[in-house]
Amino acid sequence: MALKRRTRSRLYRGTMYVIFFAVIVWVLVSTNWTRLANQFFNPEVAAELFPQIITVALVNTILFTIIAFVGGALLGVLFAIMKLSSIGPYRWFATAWIELFRGLPALLTIFAVAFMLPIALDVRVPFQPVGAGLLALILVASAYMAEVIRAGIQAVPKGQTEASRSLGMSPMKTMFWIILPQGFRIIIPPLTNEFVLLLKDTSLLFIAGSTIFTKELTTFARDASTMTANSTPLVMAAMLYLIITIPLTRVVAWMERRLARQR
């Protein structure tokens, strides 16, 4: 019986291997490689994108991501502390903020800040049009980061708070000098993941509009693809996104393994 079971297992695995390689061979044989290369990997079209795709699009993407991340982190700390507050109105407001901006798609948030806010309140965000999109990304990032930071604060042992209070430190000093530094050490991996998500969310800034000098990767590639009637710019943008995000995700995985060993 054991031999039959082993034989069936080998037959099953062998069949799966055959199916897998058969699909690979079918794809290789069926694909029109010449047309694919001309439409998506055209070296002449790719050469025309330089250096603007690096000096403008990539630089803007990284800059917008950093601005949204720093702004989201600062607001995230504020709302995380408010949600942990013993004062009801602060806690309720923080909870409503987090649920609102985590529940709304980032695209709709950008649209609301860029177009609804000026009409409803007659308020215009500076550095239009990209300023409105960045503010919207900051709001969205703050909601996600607030929950991550709150989890990091609550993960710090309560003995740390009791020890600092016994030394005469005020609650505010205890939070900013004792709890938050330890909490941030715990939440570095999820915050890095949030940075990666923000990097990709900058592709939504097109909804607020852009100028020649404020285009990020996706908008730059889309416009170039329209002008050249070729999809190579989109592939180039995708490759640049991967060049940034893959090392970051590998760093996150390494940090998670290191923290797991330390625990």
Image (cartoon, rainbow, N blue to C red):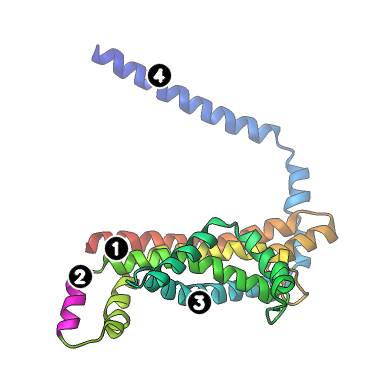
Give x and y (percent) for residue 158: 20, 70
SS for tag 3? Answer: helix
Amino acid type of disc 3? Val
Mark 4–mark 2 distance (CA, rounded to whole Å): 56 Å
Image position, residue 236 (x, y; %):
68, 60
Whichever of labels 4 and 1 marks the residue nearer the N terminus, that label is 4
* Mark identifier at residue 258: 1
- Label number found at residue 239: none
Compared with 145, 124 (above or below) is below
Mark 3 or 2: in front is 2
Residue type marked 4:
Leu
Q: Is residue 23 left or right of residue 219?
A: left
User: What type is the residue that disc 1 sits on?
Assistant: Arg
What span is colored magenta in the figure?
158-166
Q: Are the residues tagged 4 and 3 within 8 Å (C-beta)?
A: no
Number of the label disc, if any, that sits on residue 158: 2
Pointer 1 local density, CA inside 10 Å: few below 14, some 14–19, many at least 20: few
Q: Judge depth for marks 4 and 1 and give the one in front.
A: 1
When asked about the image quadrant of residue 178, the answer is bottom left
CA gap, disc 2 and disc 1: 23 Å
Compare marks 3 and 2 and give the one earlier in the sequence. Answer: 3
Do the residues under discs 4 and 2 have CB atoms within 8 angstroms? no
Choose the circle earlier in sequence order: 2 or 1. Answer: 2
* Distance Cα–Cα, label 3 vs label 1: 25 Å
User: x, y (%) of residue 153?
Assistant: 31, 69
The residue at the far bottom in this view is 168
Q: Position of residue 113 (x, y in %)?
A: 66, 69
Is residue 55 magenta-colored? no
Q: CA distance from mark 4 to mark 1?
A: 40 Å
User: What amino acid is at disc 2?
Assistant: Lys
**Residue underneath mark 4:** 11
The disc placed on residue 70 is 3
